[in-house]
Amino acid sequence: MPRPRTIGGNKFVKFRVSEKFYALIKELAERSGLTISETCRSALEIFFMGLVTGKFKHIEEEFNRLLKEKRNYKN
């Protein structure tokens, strides 16, 4: 039987991550006493609240700058 798409009015959001990233999320969840689902949901809520309130005004530029630096460092 397939998993329902909603439970109590809540929708499921699924995404794939690498084993390394999963281990990081799992470790953070265990340290904070949360489930992996609660940890991911909290991170998304904080991120989008920051975008909406303007706290992360330059986050995209900063992310791209750090990514470029990391790629240049590898080469």
Image: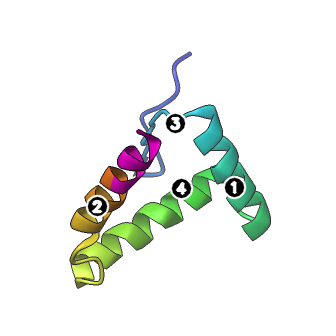
Q: Amino acid at mark 1?
A: Thr
- The residue mark sitting in front, 3 or 2, is 2
Residue 35: mark in rendering = 1
Residue sitting at 74 percent across and 55 percent down? 27
Q: How many marks?
A: 4
Residue 24: mark in rendering = none
Residue 17: mark in rendering = 3
Q: Secondary structure at mark 2?
A: helix
Nearer-N-terminus badge (4/1) = 1
Q: Amino acid at mark 4?
A: Cys
- In the picture, which quadrant includes the N terminus? top right
Q: CA distance from mark 4 to mark 2?
A: 24 Å
Q: CA distance from mark 1 to mark 2?
A: 32 Å
Q: Nearer the viewer, residue 52 or 66?
A: 66
Proximity of marks 1 and 3: CB atoms separated by less than 8 Å: no
- The residue mark sitting in front, 1 or 3, is 3
Residue sitting at 73 percent across and 69 percent down? 32
Q: CA distance from mark 1 to mark 3?
A: 16 Å
Proximity of marks 4 and 2: CB atoms separated by less than 8 Å: no
| Image quarter of residue 15 | top left
Q: Is residue 49 magenta?
A: no
Q: Amino acid at mark 2?
A: Arg
Residue 47: percent from the left, percent from the top? 38, 68
Residue 28: percent from the left, percent from the top? 69, 60
- The residue mark sitting in front, 3 or 4, is 3
- The residue mark sitting in front, 1 or 2, is 2
**Residue wearing tag 2:** 65
**Residue wearing tag 4:** 40
Q: Is residue 23 above or below residue 31?
A: above
Q: Is residue 24 above or below residue 12?
A: below
Q: Secondary structure at mark 4?
A: helix
